Image: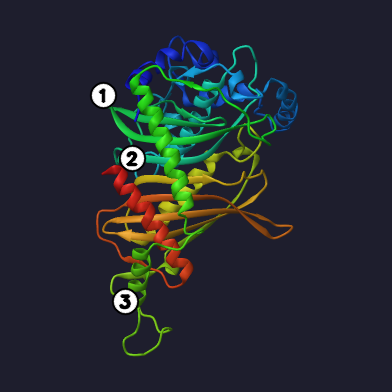
Amino acid sequence: MFSPRVLKSASSLMCRGFSTGQLCRQGKAADVAEVRNRLREIVGASTNWKDHQQALAERTSLSQYLAQSQDELPAKTMKDSAVEAHLPLGSQPALREKYLNYHNSVRFGRILEDLDSLAVLICYSHTWNKELKRSPLSIVTALVDKIDMRKNIIYPDCDIKFTGHVTWVGKTSIEAKMHVSQCHDGAYTDVLDATFVMVARDPENKRAAFINPLKLESPEEKAIFQQGEINKTRRVELSTASLLKVAPAAEERTLIHNLFLNTLDTRTVSFRSRILSPNSVWMEDAKMKGLEICHPQERNIFNRIFGGFLMRKAYELGWANACAFAGCRPTLVAVDDIIFRKPVEIGSLLLLSSQVCYTEGMHIQVRVHTEVLDPLTRQHSTTNVFHFTFCVEKDIPAVVPQSYGESMLYLDGKRHFDETMRSQG
């Protein structure tokens, strides 16, 4: 839920307070490229690799400006963090090339990168201290709670508008909601709604840091904030009920057992003899893998790999997996529950594994797991887990688990799919 009053104020807010700086050009909202430039200014990062490392080393002195408690910080309003940014695909053909895919639509992975940058800027807008030249906070993405698509086609030659603001704050974490729309035939139409959760840390990104409380100015804003509380409670409940922690529910156990029985070979009396039902695929045969060498070009303002880059790569692998599985072009329905467990360092070998883990009707649920490999120690560390829901225009085969581990992936995929359908229903 967005506050129309707050979002309507976004453009004017770009021209005063924190967002003034380099983000306002004669009363106009920023281009997406300016958002990233402004983020570099906020933390003192450089576009030069060597200078960048030195600038971040100098950030340690900013620790003296951190608040010792949230009570020391002035309350901010939702309007204080309202930001608007434009992606001028209609007027800049050179930029269009970066976003164009071979279906003559927009590469959604690029939109994910832009959303991640904007979410960080929104949170810096909320925490900005105009008395300081640079922010002592390191604000990073903790998770993507939800991205719901509102249209199937994003035109590659029409301008896109991003708006958003802070909707909930804790002591060290912030929820930011964003709305994306596109100008087509003279009017803006909805593209997607996104909810990100960010965390504030100290200048060295080693421990949590306090952020400004949120001042609610209307019943509408109180309702938005309450929804943030509900979202937080839901995330805690989902984490508590994770299949990595507790056994499946009774009906889930029955579902898995029925899938098992349906694959037994009736000609033999053996639990080991398994056959596929018609129009089915073993989960083992519905995978796709990828590898990325993490170069400095993909770094964020804190000298780690940019979260938006990780989301783009995971999405593109997940999309390719769904495409190969269905035998046709899939359309994204939702992005759900992306968790950033561990930062990815420059120079890492990033391993990506995509799995079609659940199907229903024309829908495909894909899970992408990413991990870094240390080539010296050969140790693997999970960094992210991504969940994507796709739709195609024909019925698709059912995926069938064989092992207990695959069965848990199947149930986890079903849970995410059911949650997506409930939220969109």
Q: Is residue 315 above or below residue 263?
A: above
- Evaluate whether residue 114 shows in this view: yes
Task: Give how far across and how far down residue 260 sits, in percent.
Answer: 37, 75
- Evaluate whether residue 327 shows in this view: no
Say which residue label 2 marks.
149
Q: Secondary structure at mark 2?
A: strand
Q: Quadrant of residue 371?
A: bottom right
Query: Disc 3 marks which amino acid?
Result: Asn
Tell us which disc is closer to us: 3 or 2.
3
User: Which of these two is toward me, 320 or 408?
Assistant: 408
Q: Are marks 1 and 2 in contact (CB under 8 Å)?
A: no
Q: Is residue 354 above or below residue 88?
A: below
Q: Quadrant of residue 128?
A: top right
Tell us which disc is closer to us: 3 or 1.
3
User: Which of these two is toward me, 320 or 224?
Assistant: 224
Say which residue label 1 marks.
187
Residue at (33% x, 37% y) in the render: 154
Say which residue label 3 marks.
262
Q: Secondary structure at mark 1?
A: strand
Query: Disc 1 marks which amino acid?
Result: Ala
Task: Give how far across and how far down residue 129 sits, in percent.
Answer: 59, 16
Residue at (37% x, 90% y) in the render: 269
Quick one: label 3 or label 1, which is nearer the N terminus? 1
